[in-house]
Amino acid sequence: MEQFDFQKEVIARSHEVPVVVDFWAPWCGPCRVLGPVLEQMAAEANGRWELVKINTEEHREVAQTYQIMSIPAVKLFFEGKVIGEFVGALPRSQIEKWLDAYIPDERKLQLAEIMSELELDREGGLAKLKNFVQQHPDLDEGRVNLALQLVSEQPQAAKKMVADIHPAHEMYEQAEDVRALAAFYSFEAKDDSPVAQRLEAARQAAQQQNMETALQKLVEAVMIDKNYADELPRKAMIAFFHLLGPEHELTKAYRPRFNMALY
C-alpha cells in the first residue's frame, strides 16, 4: 500500500488551495471513465485547484470517515472542510459547472469590487476593469462585463470580446445582450421608414444617456415592426432591461408597455 498522509496532502493543503478528492477503486468501471477526465482538468487548472486520488481499497479508514457509500465519489476540500461533492461519472461540462459553483475564486471577488467602484467612479473603475481583464483574460465574467461597459462607444470591439461565448456558456445571456447592443449602437438606417426613424432616435438618445427617450422610441419601433432588422428593437429593449435591472424605475415603467407592444 502506498504511503499517503491524508491530513497533510488534503486537509493541510486545502488551506492553501482547493483540493478535489477522487475516491475510486480499480474494479470500478465508472471510476476509470471519470479519472482521466479529472486528471486532464487538473492539468489544465493552472493551480486554481489540485487533484488527489484516493483508492478506497487501500485507504478504507479515510473512505469510512467520509462515508463513501458509492464510487466514484468526488469531494471538494477547502480550508479543511468539504464544501462540495458529487457521485458518479459526470460529463466534463457538468464537472466544469460544479467547479465554477463551488471553488472559491479571489478573482471574482476582486471583479465584484471593481464593478461596485464603477458605479461611483466610472473613469477610475473602467481603468481598473480593463487592467483586470488584461491580467485575467481567461475569466469570461470579466471580459463580458468590460464588453457591456464599452459597447455604447466601441460596439464592434465589444462584440468581438464575446465572440467565443456560445449557447451552452453560463454567461450566454449577457453575451447576447452585448451582441444586441452592439447592433443597436452600430445601427444606420437603410431606409426612411417609421421604424427606422424610431430606432435612429433611440440610438441617439441612448448615446446621450437619455434612457427614458431611448426606451420610448424602442417601444414605438416594436409596435410598428417587432421583426425589423432581425428583431433589433425587441432585442435592444431586453438588453437594456437586463442592464437596468428589474427594480429600476424605467424597467418597471416600460416593461409592461413592451410586453403589450409584443402582443
Image (cartoon, rainbow, N blue to C red):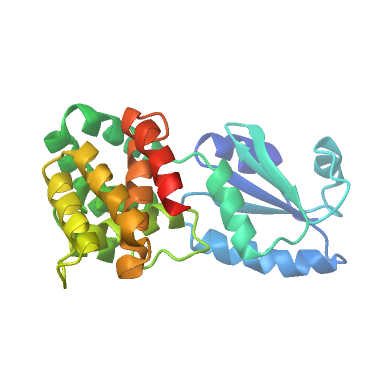
> Foreground residue, 2 or 17?
17
Q: Is residue 5 visible?
A: no
Q: Residue furthest bottom?
A: 190
Please indicate, yes or no, whether residue 123 appears anywhere in the rendered image: yes
How many circles with numbers are drawn on the protein? Answer: 0
Residue 20 on image: x %, y %: 63, 48
Q: Does residue 49 appear to the left or right of 126 in the view shown?
A: right
- Seen at 13% across and 53% down, the residue is 153
Q: Quadrant of the N terminus?
A: bottom right
**Which residue is drawn at the image coordinates 16% and 38% (left, top)?**
210
Residue 63, position as x, y percentages in the image: 83, 44
> Where, by quadrant of the figure, is residue 252 drawn?
top left
Establish if 186 lies above or below 113. below
Lateral position of residue 190 relative to residue 183, left or right: left
- Which residue occupies the foreground of this view, 256 or 77? 256
Q: Residue 138: x percent and y percent?
A: 36, 57
Q: Residue at x 80, y 66 (%)?
A: 30
Q: Is residue 221 left or right of residue 245?
A: left
Q: Is residue 207 left or right of residue 74?
A: left
82 and 185: which is toward the camera: 185
Residue 170 point in image, percent of width and height = 50, 54
Give the quarter of the image for residue 65: top right
